[in-house]
Amino acid sequence: MKKDSKNTETKQCTIPSVINWVACKDALPKHETDVICYCLDFEVRVGRKTGDFWFIDGYSLPQDITHWQELPEPPCL
């Protein structure tokens, strides 16, 4: 914990700046784990892989997901 000029304790958070995209041809996310997905049709969305299907924004539609990455940690509050 840090203290600011008013002697109030504040949390200091480190935000990673590296985005680790994984090509779907190399690896797929764990079953039913929310991840950030990339597709040429809609660019970046949150989705999950369930069996042979991707669910994007709650819908299972034919998508050509090319890359994915894990969701970042939530911010410090």
Image (spheres, rainbow, N blue to C red):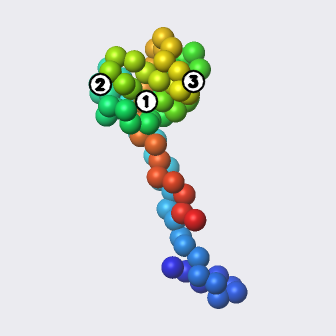
Residue at 54% x, 57% y is 75
Disc number lying in front (1 or 2)? 1
Mark 2 lies on a secondary structure that is: loop
The image quarter containing residue 10 is bottom right
- Name the residue beneath numbered marker 1: 48
- Name the residue beneath numbered marker 3: 43
User: Identity of the amino acid at label 2?
Assistant: Asp
On screen, residue 77 above or below 62: below
The label shown at residue 34 is none
For label 1, the crowd category at 10 Å Cα-Cα, with few meaning under 14, some 14 to 19 and many 20 or more, is many
User: Identity of the amino acid at label 1?
Assistant: Arg
Residue 46 location (% of width, % of height): 52, 33
Tell which circle, 1 or 3, labels the residue nearer the N-terminal end: 3
- Name the residue beneath numbered marker 2: 26
Would residue 25 be found to the left or right of residue 54 on screen? Answer: left
Mark 1 lies on a secondary structure that is: strand
Q: Which quadrant would the C terminus be assigned to in this image?
A: bottom right
Residue at 64% x, 84% y is 8
Would residue 16 be found to the left or right of residue 29 on screen? Answer: right
**Is residue 38 among what the camera can see?**
no
Disc number lying in front (1 or 3)? 1
Q: Label 1 vs label 2: CA separation?
A: 17 Å
